Amino acid sequence: MLEEQLAHSNQQNKKLSKKLDQSLKQIESLTQQLQHLTKLLYGSKTEKSKYNTPDGQVSLFEDDPSFTDSEHTEEQSQQTISYTVVRNIQKKKRNDSLRDDVEIEAIHHHPDNTICDCCQHQMVEIGGTVVREEATFIPAKMMKVQHIEHAYECRNCKSDASQSAQIKRGKAPQPPIQRSIASPSVLAKVIYDKFAQYLPLYRQVKEWSRYGLDTNDKNLSNWVIHAAHDWLLPIYERMKELMMFKSVLHVDETYSQIIHRSDGKSGQSNAYNWVYRSVPSQGPLIILFQSSLSRARSVLESFTEGYSGTIICDGYSAYDKIGGITFANCWAHVRRYWLKADSKNGQVGVKYCDELYRLERKFKHLSPSKRRKKRQKYSKPIVDKFLNWIETSPFYGKNALAKAAEYTLNRANGLRAFLNDGRIEIDNNPAENAIRPNVIGRKNWLFSVSEDGAKANAICLSIAETAKSNGIDFYEYIKKLLTDLPNIGIHQNPEILDQYMPWSKMIQATCNRR
């Protein structure tokens, strides 16, 4: 009986030990979650590494054992250190914020009386001094422009019964929107304010009223949709054709909101905006947005149909298993996972990533072929060592450290892609930066009422960001497109569109930023 009781007790002890181990692991996981959430709430939001501080430099906010050392006294405290501080005085002009091409108006101030108080003779001017310069703002004004077509007839032919009447009539240019009061300049201003200044349409209404144009946000929305679908869409589609010839692209996506959806889902459900960005080593930059109701792989497949090349992306599962496309994964996302694992092993993972980024900063200005050779020589050993360290380390469970290890190993092939091609960036930060205007705009205009409006937003954002990336004044560019395109037959001669790309010589000459 004693043996049976002993065996039963041992069995119970094993069960309790197992439960204790599970509880301790759960406590550890919950503790890490609590630390992570506390850090998100109260901690620094920067991703800059706190482990790579310059030599001799310490943080005022980190625990450091040197602060627990006893204070030096007696002779050591009597040492005097002298040093000289050299300050460079920078001379700054008072008017350096005004460009050289700004119009200058001189206002001359003369004495009220130029008769000498002593001898009553007329005084002679001996010079003038510029006492100050100031910037003066002249508000915009609204004008009503009437297009009048004049008709002419030949009276000589008219008096001859054997001749047919000869009449010539002047022809006004075609407007961007038929039967609308909106001129190219007004449309360009509306689009510029929304997609460059992120000013929603309902907030533009009061400003237009102040200028003298009484309208409402529904009219402004219709103007943007018509202009985008009729004249900006051909430019967008031509940019997409050119983008599909690139061999390397950055891709990312972010959520948005569309109130009236065609799939029957609630307006509170997430819609998505995808962004596609080319790389500088393959010609002028192209940045395109795509509005979609879904985040599914089918959206990416439809946009990249016929494309063959490499896509740099994050670890989202939609970026996989598409014929003809190789996926290169983002090291910045890997680093974030190890940064969240706020532990000694987490610091080791971050240091491996930081070492790769330190090398990338050195290779940044090299040609793609030279950058590939440098990566093979210096970066590849670090990647191999990093992945081998993860594989041989006991990272188990559901804590942040295990998640970081699993995320890295599952994408090992995609993370190695940058080593074999110098055109591939180490991360997807260019796409994340490109999608930021959409995020800023989302915080201002909140949602799109219809899918047509969301598509128009994507078109306008695409042209805005591509224009800015190529050094073009977005307002002047939109105004020229809406002035010229309705009158040059782009549907009959689509090759003309190449002359209106942001990098074309004509556009660079007429719409370049000063």
Image (cartoon, rainbow, N blue to C red):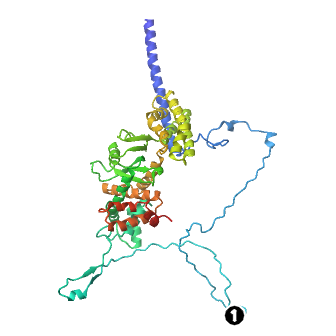
Q: Where does the image place residue 280, in percent across and percent down from the top left?
A: 47, 51
Q: Where does the image place residue 219, in percent across and percent down from the top left?
A: 32, 65
Residue at image location 51% in from the left, 27% down from the top: 392
- Above or below residue 306? Residue 397 is above
- How packed mark 1 is, by other alpha carbons closer than 10 Å (few <14, some 14-19, many 20 or more), is few
The amino acid pointed to by label 1 is: His
In this figure, which residue is indicated by the disc labeled 1? 121
Residue at image location 20% in from the left, 82% down from the top: 164
Q: Residue furthest left?
A: 161
Q: Where does the image place residue 173, in percent across and percent down from the top left?
A: 33, 72
Image quarter of residue 14: top left
- Above or below residue 125? Residue 101 is above
Image quarter of residue 134: bottom right
Q: Quadrant of the N terminus?
A: top left
**Which one is in front, 351 or 463?**
463
Report whether residue 450 is seen.
Answer: no
- Is 317 situated left or right of 64 in this image? left
Residue at image location 45% in from the left, 65% down from the top: 511
